[in-house]
Image (spheres, coloured by chain):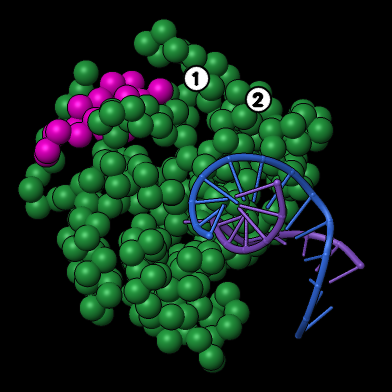
Chain colours: A green, B blue, C purple
DNA sequence: AACCAGGGGACTC
DNA sequence: GAGTCCCATGGT
């Protein structure tokens, strides 16, 4: 068992961060969460300002949950209107998780026009079928499939994981990433715009998926993914109704309103969508 | 530019 | 049990 003691100046809410829909491979039992990250099975719970966990060392947990980021500074940066202010207060401690880039890319290809339970189901099936077994406390888990393992299998096998038409996108994108071992490092070295252009060239990756991958997988916090909920909030609460119609305009307004950490603003709004949307 | 395929789980009624 | 919706994309 490892323990991280959080400082009072750096709030973190484990439950909120894992249940808001940014990650798909975590399950909660009581106050304990179990997740597969890379090749690790991580068990973790929060008791006040203490994180108690096994399966990973403290440096990994700090990096994964973005604990070393100065959250009050980030939130101060995006706290620019009353709705955002209220949302920040109601979702204290939500942090954007630093996901493995490939897993994030493949997951969000699976996430198109689907609800969160459905996305979790697909990713679980893909991992069981194409991932490697990982054992923890007598249970068997499966790591997320590598690009190679997805590229080398039959498209119809991918389809059997309830991914529907996304099967061919996954197969084609896996092939490209598998053939380019330097893929992640190359993208990391690019600017937001250039990295986005590279991602958009992949099958199954449109503007929204690209922005999710940049935000959750590449730590580009200016990315402002616009899904149907964020679109609703931006149009109803931020006046993006008439003149702003397309994706780039709504995402651009998000970046303009919230600045270099617009992605954090997006995640707070998304997390709080069920409270915000009925009220505006 | 406006449509449509594609699939499945969750929620509402 | 039908209807609707969901962290959309790609093709026509």
Residue A164 image position (x, y, % from top left): 74, 44
Q: Which residues are magenta?
A: A41-60
Q: Is residue A135 left or right of residue A64?
A: right
Q: Mark 1 — residue?
A: A141
Q: Residue A151, located in which quarter of the rendered image?
A: top right
Q: Nearest the camera: A34 or A195? A: A34
Q: Mark 2 or mark 1: which comes first in sequence?
A: 2
**In the image, what residue occupies the spot 40% across and 14% down?**
A136
Residue A245 included in the magenta stretch of the image: no
Element type where label 2 sits in the image: helix
Q: Residue at x 36, y 57 (%)?
A: A271
Residue A166, given in percent of the width and then of the height, sits at 72, 47
Determine the CA span between mark 2 and mark 1: 12 Å
Tell me: residue A76, above or below residue A115: below
> Residue pushed farthest bottom?
A243
Q: Main secondary structure of the magenta part?
A: strand
Q: Residue at x 50, y 78 (%)?
A: A250
């Amino acid at each position: 068992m490892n323990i991280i003691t959080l400082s009072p100046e750096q709030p973190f809410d484990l439950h909120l961060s894992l249940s808001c829909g940014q990650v798909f491979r975590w399950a909660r039992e009581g106050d304990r969460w179990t997740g597969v990250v890379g090749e690790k099975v991580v068990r973790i719970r929060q008791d006040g300002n203490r994180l108690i966990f096994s399966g990973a060392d403290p440096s990994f947990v700090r990096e994964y949950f973005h604990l070393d980021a100065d959250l009050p500074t980030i939130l101060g940066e995006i706290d620019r209107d009353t709705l955002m202010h209220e949302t920040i207060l109601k979702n204290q401690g939500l942090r954007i998780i630093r996901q493995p880039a490939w897993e994030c890319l493949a997951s969000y290809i699976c996430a198109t026009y689907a609800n969160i339970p459905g996305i979790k189901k697909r990713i679980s099936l893909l991992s069981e079928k194409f991932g490697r077994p990982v054992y923890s406390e007598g249970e068997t888990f499966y790591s997320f499939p590598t690009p190679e393992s997805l590229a080398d299998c039959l498209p119809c096998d991918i389809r059997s994981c309830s991914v529907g038409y996304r099967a061919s996108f996954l197969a084609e994108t896996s092939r490209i990433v598998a053939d380019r071992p330097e893929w992640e490092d190359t993208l990391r070295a690019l600017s937001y715009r250039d990295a986005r252009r590279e991602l958009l060239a992949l099958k199954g990756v449109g503007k929204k998926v690209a922005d999710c991958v940049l935000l959750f997988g590449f730590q580009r916090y200016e990315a402002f993914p616009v899904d149907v909920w964020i679109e609703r909030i931006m149009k109803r609460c931020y006046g993006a109704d008439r003149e702003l119609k397309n994706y780039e305009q709504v995402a651009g307004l998000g970046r303009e309103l919230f600045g270099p950490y617009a992605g954090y603003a997006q995640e707070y709004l998304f997390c709080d969508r069920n409270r915000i949307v009925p009220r505006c």
